[in-house]
Image: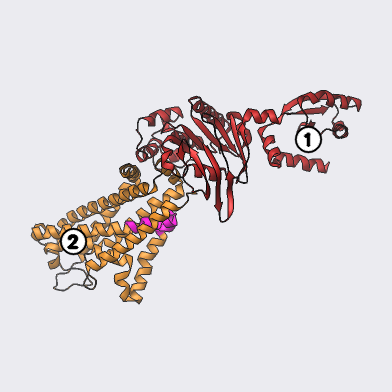
Amino acid sequence: MITGAFRSEWIKLRRPSLLVSTYIGLAAAAALFTILLFTQAGNGRHRDGGIPTLTELGQPNGLIHGLSQATVLLGIVAFGIAAAQIASEYSLGTLRQLLVRQPRRWVLLAGKYLGVLTFLAIAVVFAAVLATVVAFAMAHGRHVPTAAWTSSTGISDLTRALGNLVLAVIGYASLGLAVGLFIRSSVFSVIIGFAWLLPIEQIVMRIVPATTPWLPGSALTIVGQGGTASVSYAHSLLVSLAYVVVAGALATVTFIRRDVTA
Amino acid sequence: MSTRSLTKRFDDKAVVDQLALAIPTGSVCGFVGPNGAGKTTTIRMLLGLIRPSSGTGTVLGGNLGDPPSYLDKVGALIEAPAFYPQLSGRANLRVLVRLGRISSRPIDDVLHRVGLAERASDRYRTYSLGMKQRLGIAAALLVSPELLVLDEPTNGLDPGGILEMRGLIRSLADDGITVFVSSHLISEIEHICDHVVMIQAGRAVYQGPVAELRARQGSDIVARPEQIEDLDGLAALLQVAGYEVRLELESEAVVVQTGADGAAGVNRTAMNGGITLQYLAERHRSLEDAFFELTGTHSRDTQQRHELEAVR
């Protein structure tokens, strides 16, 4: 049953306007981050403004710096797309059609959730592949050795970084789906989500730095970066998981119990 | 399809109140009432979109509280058709086919049936209102339904579209599908239904065969004097003679509420009063008249007439 809902969701997701803009947009952004990283990287022994040095970029984990920098951007785009996908079912009125054909609401929601998550996970992998290709080209231009990138350690680091990025994006998308379900308006869901993840969280963290490990956007970003010096990966993963589970459970119960009057 | 004491309250206000429906299998049943009478809420409860506050029901042998037990045999068009604007008509149907795990074979069949086959590959957003409505019907037919629920299917259609829709509904009924069609236009229902449920303020005021209601309704006599100046005099004469009358200014006639056999009496009363009639005919009362009689309300036209009478 979930397979049917999943395949149905993909008919909507693969429409050219959404698929091309998301995949090309995210890939272009990831490529741009990589280009900026390589052009701004210095020759010195110490980082300048948090940007890795060319020597660091030549290490086995050199490839993942660009991807990690793109976590927030990829996450916010994932949040927006996921929120819009579910909220638009209310604003277009299509939800009533869907629920007549699939009255088991949890099945519809699960299929939709899996559809959106796979769509975004593939988008992230596609962006990562393009960013990697760009990184090789940029490395050649800036005389950064790439032999370490293709070593077993390098490939292992890259795979882990990509996995973390996909996990972070899945987290952002899950929160987006939950917010979309509660708000039921694409525009307001995206506005509220962006407002929280960008200025509000940033302001809160600046005023009360101790909140950094506990805020949803911050925790997901740290997961995407594989942990930071001040906040561990495991802690961020647990905090993110808690947010996703609570938001997902509340959204599911609301979706199943709420009357469809749209 | 039947319900017992079906009730839906929103903030303590009963939108549907103790509704008991009994829709015969194979009928084309009209569900009529003014805007806000509770038609759409009832339909949404039947389709599992809204949870009833209380009451029970059965649809095609399935329990109203368990929509999955019967919705695979139900097609529905709820209010305005709603589809994804960027997808084609065919892709929109494919979304529903995949979701309901229905064979995709009927997509072309239903598109042919509603006359959309040639535009099936065009994006939904380029469709006219009539085409959107037809795609809604096509979506409802995907499951080869035993019951078709149509909520205001002629809304926004031009006269040609309304005629087309009527024909389509009749042809579906001819295939043995039970059709439950709601409308706030009672005259619209009159043309296509053999059974009717009239609802007002969430309560059923009548349900039964249209023919039975018509027979109960009887007819009026319309009398027009030769001289227009005699219109008021004719009305007064008939009133004195004990008839219930009303003026119909647009047709310059007096409408007498009596059976067809009352024509002779009306003619005699006019003649005795020295008024020559130019026109005397029987007019069957419409379902709209029946509705207003049953609910003790008046249509806008009737209200207007009464206001004009007062002015005169």
- The prevailing secondary structure element of the residues shown in magenta is helix
Q: Residues within 10 Å of mark 2 (few under 14, many from 20)?
A: many
| Residue B187 in picture, x, y percent from top left | 63, 33
Mark 1 and mark 2: Cα distance apart in space: 85 Å
**Spot occupied by residue B109 in the image (x, y as percentages of width and height):** 40, 28
Q: Residue at x 46, y 42 (%)?
A: B82
Query: Which chain, by letter, is red?
Result: B
Chain shown in orange: A
Q: What segment is highlighted magenta in the picture?
A: A173-190
Q: Residues within 10 Å of mark 1 (few under 14, many from 20)?
A: some
Q: Residue at x 23, y 72 (%)?
A: A49
Mark 1 sits on what residue? B249
Instruction: Verify whether residue A57 appears in magenta.
Output: no
Residue A175 located within the stretch drawn in magenta: yes
Relative image position of residue A193 (x, y in whole percent): 38, 61
Give whichever of A170, B16 is nearer the camera. B16
Q: Kindly identify which chain the residue marked by label 2 belongs to.
A: A
Mark 2, secondary structure of its residue: helix
Residue A138 visible, this angle: no
Rendered-image quadrant of the C terminus of chain B: top right
Q: Chain of mark 1?
A: B
The answer to whether residue A230 is above or below residue B297 is: below
Query: Residue at point 21% right, 66% down?
Result: A40
Q: Amino acid at mark 2?
A: Ile
Q: Nearer the viewer, residue A130 or A181?
A: A181
The reply to whether dot 1 and dot 2 touch (C-beta < 8 Å) is: no
What residue type is disc 1 on? Leu
Residue B100 lies in what quarter of the image?
Answer: top left
Residue A248 visible in the snapshot = yes
Residue with the mark numbered 2: A64
Q: The residue tagged with tag 1: helix, strand or loop? A: helix
Q: Tell me if B219 is positioned left or right of A63 in this view.
A: right
